Image (cartoon, helix red, strand yellow):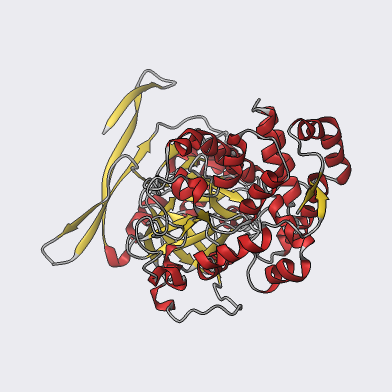
């Protein structure tokens, strides 16, 4: 116990007293004794660990350290006393642990996710108990913390001590409203693929059940990929349940993304890439300038793999209001400009998605195939074809769908290539960016070699992120690596900003082109009519 003197109105001294006790309860009646003590004014001592002990009766008990602060009477007004009493009752209701629960960790791409305290700037990493309730689920801890999603899109944690924070008005709102803020509704997302893909070896694939956790505000629980903290977004963010380590993992995976990569693995063989190069690299589809092509890609979404969950309270977030690919390109170019990057980097940022324009120039073949079977023009993680598949390849669980996997010509270390031949001499997956790279070269664009490397290799994450293909690369590739990594990082930042941004109008795009980017295009011989 700890105590300190407090001067009273008389000659005597009275003391603040801090009392500690252990709530020792049978784990089958989890929370009942703790709840009883909380109603008496005690709180779980967050700095101490909960212990599990075995007594002589062969039962396991949970030993929860608790404390209560006994203060001398103060001349509080009746309204202030009532407010404090109401807060304690409300908080006790929020952290009630009645009902089934399961320990779980909330995990992002860099490990356990942090959450900010509701009443101060403290950032905490907590082990959660997910508790099932009639309204959905809530996340609590054995120390009395509870996860809270507020209407402004923030996610924070209420701690036991927050009930005494006079400056926090959230604890004074209606109990029912505050209780809703602590609930998340889990929605299972189907991973059924309605397209015809030969999946005879589907037993080799890893089953990945995807969920979204919706708040009462129509937002969705997610992981901030930059700050590595919990937050909310208007667009659905997906979680995978991992039973082996009792975790919920926030992932960029979505059903449309999985379907696309499954098709990538099926179609993108060495022979397929060879045939597509023969078909498209004669550039006989038609003629158009790059600014015309920028206008065409306004019809395509910036985030083609996003899933949408029907929600009347969230009507502003829908495919019809999502940013277009043209908006993403101009936003990326403007970001490069604001950051002081060279003008040719700004131009690459503006043009790097123009490979999708092939669907407009070739509607009866590429366009129709993209609608019904497989869209090769969409930017997605690339790989070298004609050699062994890297360990870190995206959605590697689908590799059994690729015929090259069983072909001895293509499944050895270097495959059909000479050691250290350089990436200039290998076949990459056939994609919109691969087509654009050859389009610019064939039409006389006079960009620096670093610009061409950015366009062709920024999707080759196996190389520039994970160091794969070291037996194929050479010194020239290593010289280009920093430029490609910087460009990919720029694109990732801008794509995060572009999730909820408004679309740029035709007038805004024309203004930016006429007053800035048109001159850069002319400087690098990219302003004329191209043969596509």
Residue farthest along the right direction in this orientation? 507
Q: Position of residue 262 (x, y in %)?
A: 52, 68
Left or right for 432, reference 132: right
Please tell me which residue lies in front, 248 or 397.
397
Q: In the rendered view, would you say 347 is above or below 101?
A: above
Residue 274 pos. (x, y %): 56, 63
- Quadrant (top left/top right/bottom left/bottom right) for the C terminus: bottom right
62 and 274: which one is in front? 274
Residue 483 at x, y percent in the picture: 54, 34
- The answer, for residue 244, to whether it is visible in the render is yes
Residue 520 horizontal/vertical position (percent): 76, 31
**Is 175 left, or right, of 466 in this rendering?**
right
Extreme top residue here? Answer: 11
Quarter holding residue 388: bottom left
* Depicted 355 relative to depicted 441: above or below: below
Report whether residue 307 is seen: no
- At a point 39% along the width and 74% down the height, the residue shown is 204
Q: Nearer the viewer, residue 313 or 511?
A: 511
């Amino acid at each position: 116990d700890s105590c300190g003197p407090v001067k009273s109105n008389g000659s005597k001294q009275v003391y603040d007293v801090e009392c500690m006790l252990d709530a020792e309860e049978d784990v089958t009646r989890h929370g009942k004794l703790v709840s009883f003590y909380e109603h008496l004014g005690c709180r779980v001592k967050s700095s101490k660990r909960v212990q599990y002990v075995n007594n002589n009766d062969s039962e396991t008990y949970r030993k929860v350290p608790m404390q209560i602060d006994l203060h001398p009477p103060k001349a509080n007004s009746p309204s202030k006393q009532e407010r404090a009493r109401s807060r304690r009752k409300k908080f006790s209701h929020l952290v009630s642990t009645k009902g089934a629960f399961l320990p779980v960790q909330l995990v992002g791409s860099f490990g356990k996710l942090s959450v900010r305290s509701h009443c101060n700037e403290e950032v905490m990493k907590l082990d959660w108990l997910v508790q099932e309730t009639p309204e959905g689920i809530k996340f609590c801890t054995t120390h009395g913390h509870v996860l809270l999603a507020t209407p402004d899109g923030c996610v924070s944690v209420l701690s036991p001590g927050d009930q005494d924070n006079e400056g926090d008005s959230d604890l004074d709102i209606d109990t029912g409203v505050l209780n809703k803020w602590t609930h998340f509704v889990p929605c299972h997302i189907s991973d059924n693929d309605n397209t015809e893909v030969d999946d005879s070896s589907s037993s080799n694939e890893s089953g990945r059940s995807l969920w979204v956790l919706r708040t009462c505000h129509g937002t969705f629980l997610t992981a901030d990929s930059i700050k590595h903290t919990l937050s909310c977004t208007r667009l659905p963010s997906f979680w995978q349940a991992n039973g082996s380590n009792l975790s919920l993992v926030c992932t960029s995976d979505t059903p449309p993304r999985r379907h696309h990569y499954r098709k990538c693995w099926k179609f993108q063989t060495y022979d397929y890439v060879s045939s597509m190069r023969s078909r498209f690299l004669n550039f006989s589809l038609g003629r158009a300038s790059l600014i015309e092509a920028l206008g065409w890609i306004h019809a395509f979404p910036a985030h083609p793999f996003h899933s949408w969950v029907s929600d009347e309270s969230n009507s502003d977030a829908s495919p019809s209001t999502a940013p277009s690919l043209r908006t993403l390109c101009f936003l990326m170019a403007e970001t490069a400009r604001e950051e002081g990057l060279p003008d040719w980097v700004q131009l690459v940022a503006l043009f790097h998605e123009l490979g999708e324009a092939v669907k407009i120039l070739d509607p009866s073949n590429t366009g129709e195939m993209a609608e019904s079977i497989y869209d090769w023009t969409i930017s997605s993680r690339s790989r070298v074809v004609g050699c062994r598949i890297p360990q870190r390849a995206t959605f590697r669980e689908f590799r059994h769908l690729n015929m090259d996997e069983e072909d001895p010509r293509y499944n050895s270390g270097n495959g059909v290539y000479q050691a250290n031949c350089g990436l200039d001499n290998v076949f990459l997956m056939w994609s919109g960016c691969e087509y654009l790279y050859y389009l610019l070269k064939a039409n006389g664009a006079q960009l620096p070699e670093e610009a061409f490397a950015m366009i062709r290799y920024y999707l080759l994450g196996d190389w520039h992120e994970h160091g794969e293909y070291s037996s194929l690369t050479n010194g020239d590739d290593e010289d280009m690596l920093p430029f490609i990594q910087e460009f990919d990082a720029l694109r990732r930042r801008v794509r995060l900003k572009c999730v909820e941004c408004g679309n740029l109008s035709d007038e805004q795009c024309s203004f930016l082109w006429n007053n800035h980017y048109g001159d850069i295009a002319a400087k690098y011989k990219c302003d004329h009519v191209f043969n596509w």
